[in-house]
Structures are given as C-alpha cells and as structure tokens.
Image (cartoon, helix red, strand yellow):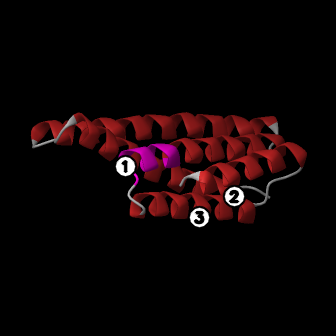
C-alpha cells in the first residue's frame, strides 16, 4: 500500500548521501508520495494512517533538502536560512493551533478527525516548504 512512499524516501536519502540531490529528484519523490497516499486512501486504507505516513515522508524529505542546502551555502547564507526555517516552524505551529481552535469552536468531530485535520494541514505546509526550499538548490 504505502511501499511506494518508502521506496521514494529511501532512494532520495541514499542519493543524498552519495551526491547532490537534484530538485527534479526531490519533486519526483514528493509526487510519488502524494500518489502513494492517494492510492492508499482509494484502496480502502484508513485516511488518517495514509496521511500520517505522507506527513512523515514529507518531513524526511524536508530534512534532506535542508541538509543539501547546508552543504551548498556559506555560513552567512545558511544562518539566514536557519533563521527563516525557525520562523517557518513558528508559522506551522501557529497554523496547527489555529486549526485546533477552529475545531474546538464547532463540531470538531472525534479525536481521529481532529488529528487528521492537523496532520493533513501540516503535510500541506511541509510540501509547500519543500517546493520553496528546493528552488534554492543549485
């Protein structure tokens, strides 16, 4: 079911250790993860499980991209990126808090529904960040 995600992730991580990871490889990995998640959901997999696996894989890819940029950048440029990343983390946490508060005001559903909304939002946030940071890779 989610085998495609793990294969994409392992391939990307292995490549990152050997040589520079290209933006095209990162984009392809993200696309395979999205397709695997959709296939998981379409085949009757629990949506919360499928999205949790997607979130974990995207977080790993973000780490690969961040490490790649660290290798490429001089200390000053990487310092700016690190500060930017910290700000992004605050924005992500604020976004998750806002989603939680929104669910608290209305019928937030059960705990699984709440977790799914937060994980899905977090995954989307991660994917946007990956796209943004990938553009910085030379």
> Measured along the vertical axis of the image, is residue 38 above or below residue 21?
below
Residue 46 belongs to the span the image colors magenta: yes
Q: CA distance from mark 1 to mark 3?
A: 20 Å
For marks 1 and 3, give the one nearer the viewer: 1
Residue at the disc numbered 3: 31
| Mark 1, other Cα within 10 Å: few <14 / some 14–19 / many ≥20 | few
Locate residue 71: give its quadrant: top right
| Mark 2, other Cα within 10 Å: few <14 / some 14–19 / many ≥20 | many
Q: Could you tell me which residue is drawn at 53 percent across and 64 percent down?
A: 35
For marks 3 and 2, give the one nearer the viewer: 3
Q: Earlier in the sequence, mark 1 or mark 3?
A: 3
Residue 62's spot in the image, x, y percent? 62, 45
Q: Which residues are magenta?
A: 45-54
Residue 101 belongs to the span the image colors magenta: no
Q: CA distance from mark 2 to mark 1?
A: 26 Å
Mark 1 lies on a secondary structure that is loop
Left or right of residue 132: residue 25: right
Q: Are marks 3 and 2 in contact (CB under 8 Å)?
A: no
For marks 2 and 1, give the one nearer the viewer: 1
Q: Quadrant of the C terminus?
A: bottom right
Residue at the disc numbered 2: 26
| Mark 3, other Cα within 10 Å: few <14 / some 14–19 / many ≥20 | some
Residue 81's spot in the image, x, y percent? 65, 41
Residue at the disc numbered 1: 46
């Amino acid at each position: 079911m989610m085998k495609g995600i793990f294969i994409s992730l392992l391939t990307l991580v292995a490549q990152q250790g050997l040589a520079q990871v290209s933006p095209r490889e990162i984009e392809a990995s993200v696309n395979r993860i999205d397709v695997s998640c959709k296939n998981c959901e379409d085949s009757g997999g629990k949506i919360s499980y499928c999205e949790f696996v997607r979130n974990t894989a995207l977080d790993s890819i973000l780490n690969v991209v961040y490490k790649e940029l660290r290798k490429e950048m001089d200390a000053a440029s990487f310092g700016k990126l690190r500060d930017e990343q910290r700000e992004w983390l605050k924005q992500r946490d604020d976004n998750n808090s806002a989603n939680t508060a929104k669910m608290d005001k209305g019928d937030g559903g059960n705990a699984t529904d709440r977790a799914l909304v937060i994980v899905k939002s977090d995954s989307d946030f991660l994917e946007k960040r990956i796209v943004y940071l990938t553009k910085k890779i030379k």
